[in-house]
Image: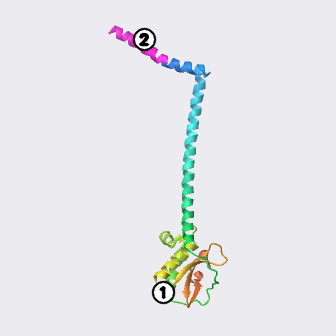
């Protein structure tokens, strides 16, 4: 037992020391002191922390880019469904119909925002752009048996407006007469 105690006291510390000694010898071969090793370890930890921040920022940026792409894609899909026409339009000669009036007036409670582009989204979120308002009104009017469609408003770029067929002519719905915000178009 005494022999085992002597071996434990003498051999184990020597074996551990040998390992530490080997590491120190390896560092000495390449010209590093213990201070240098500490500095290298500190620098490595800083690099790791910075890398972690960059990865987090990249992930956040990627998420924003995906959301923007999704929004752009949604708008592009909506854009495909409508055709440009070159007719001239006016709100004059508007025929008053109580059912049609109530459908159009139902659009007055929505707020304008460039965030949503379809009638369904506008109904769900309470806000949308001119594309959403036109889509909303056309779907409601068509469901009630009227002939209505979305068309580009002449001279207004990508602005869309709802039109309804009255007495054989496509007439632009005068949003303002129904309390619909002028942000959706005049």
Where does the image place residue 59, in percent across and percent down from the top left?
54, 49
Query: Local crowd at mark 2 within 10 Å, few (<14), some, or many (≥20)?
Result: few
Residue at 58% in and 31% down? 42
Are circles 1 and 2 on residues that touch, CB within 8 Å?
no
* Residue 112 in view here: no
Please name the predominant secondary structure of the magenta segment in the image: helix
- Residue at the outermost right position: 155
Q: Where does label 1 land, which residue?
A: 99
Residue at 58% in and 26% down? 37
Query: Range of the magenta residues?
Result: 1-18
Which of the 4 image quarters holds residue 8?
top left
Residue 46, above or below 27: below
**Which mark, by number, is residue 10?**
2
Query: Local crowd at mark 1 within 10 Å, few (<14), some, or many (≥20)?
Result: few
Q: Secondary structure at mark 2?
A: helix
Give the colour scheme of this rendering: rainbow
The quadrant of the image that shows the N terminus is top left
State the residue in front, 147 or 5: 147
Residue at 57% in and 67% down? 76
- Residue at the outermost left position: 1
Q: Secondary structure at mark 1?
A: helix
Where does the image place residue 181, in percent across and percent down from the top left?
58, 76
Please report whichever mark, 1 or 2, sits nearer to the chain's N-terminal start: 2
State the residue in front, 131 or 73: 73
Q: Is 30 in the magenta?
A: no
* Residue 39 in view here: yes
**Which mark, by number, is residue 19?**
none
Which of the 4 image quarters holds residue 167?
bottom right
Residue at 60% in and 28% down? 39
Where does the image place residue 82, in percent across and percent down from the top left?
56, 75
């Amino acid at each position: 037992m005494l022999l085992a105690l002597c071996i434990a006291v003498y051999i184990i510390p020597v074996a551990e020391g040998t390992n530490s000694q080997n590491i120190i010898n390896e560092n000495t071969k390449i010209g590093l002191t213990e201070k240098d090793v500490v500095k290298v370890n500190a620098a490595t930890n800083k690099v790791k922390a910075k890398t972690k921040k960059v990865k987090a920022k990249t992930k956040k940026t990627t998420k924003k880019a995906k959301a923007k792409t999704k929004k752009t894609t949604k708008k592009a899909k909506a854009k495909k469904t409508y055709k440009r026409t070159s007719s001239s339009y006016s709100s004059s000669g508007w025929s008053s119909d109580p059912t049609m009036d109530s459908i159009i007036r139902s659009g007055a409670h929505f707020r304008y925002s460039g965030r949503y582009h379809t009638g369904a989204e506008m109904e769900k979120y309470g806000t949308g752009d001119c594309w959403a308002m036109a889509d909303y009104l056309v779907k409601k009017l068509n469901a009630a048996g009227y002939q209505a469609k979305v068309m580009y408003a002449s001279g207004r770029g990508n602005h869309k407006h709802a039109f309804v067929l009255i007495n054989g002519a496509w007439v632009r719905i005068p949003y303002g007469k129904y309390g619909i915000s002028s942000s959706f178009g005049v």
